[in-house]
Amino acid sequence: MGLFDRLRPGRGSGRTRMRRPGRDAARTGSTTVRASDRADEQHLLDFVRGRRGVEGFVEPRTAVSDVTLLLVAHDGEWTRRRVPSVAWAHRFCNDQQVPSYDAAVVGVPQRMREWNARQRHARREAGPQA
């Protein structure tokens, strides 16, 4: 047996093959990710309705994730969910009267990084959970 024979499909030590992804999964590069669904849309809608000063940052597809919509509130609180497409994300933001930006161009806002730092600090202050 050659060095790479085990890596070839149908050869080697009789290992089982990986299953194909289900219908609700999308293939992105070498990774299979879950496709967006109605629960993702509802979560984004709830976030927009429950907070003020929300802005949307549309993140493009990468090798490890599908298109995502990052919503950031006025205080830096944020959420991120998969969305069907870049166009869908901008349309969602427009329908909710939320400004939307291309995250690959403008990046993410400083207030989000500050909110993350406050959360880390609060967790450290709370100490280990019993």
Image (spheres, rainbow, N blue to C red):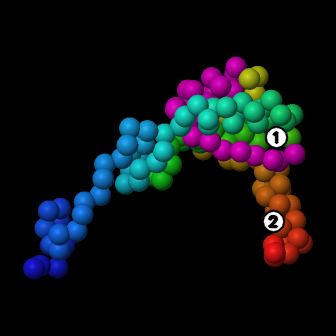
87 horizontally vs 33: left or right: right
Quarter of the image for residue 120 reads: bottom right
Task: Please report the residue visible at 65 percent of the width from the left and 25 percent of the height from the top.
Answer: 92
Task: Please report the residue visible at 62 percent of the width from the left and 42 percent of the height from the top.
Answer: 81
Q: Which quarter of the image is occupied by the N terminus? A: bottom left
16 horizontally vs 35: left or right: left
Between residues 22 and 123, which one lies in front from this camera angle? 22
Between residues 102 and 89, which one lies in front from this camera angle? 89
**Residue 94: percent from left, percent from top:** 69, 22
Q: Residue furthest top?
A: 95
Q: Secondary structure at mark 1?
A: loop
Per the model, the C-alpha gap separating discs 2 and 1 is 18 Å
- The amino acid type found where label 2 is placed reads Arg
The residue carrying mark 2 is 120
The image's mark for residue 73 is 1
Magenta-colored span:
75-95
Q: Residue furthest left?
A: 1
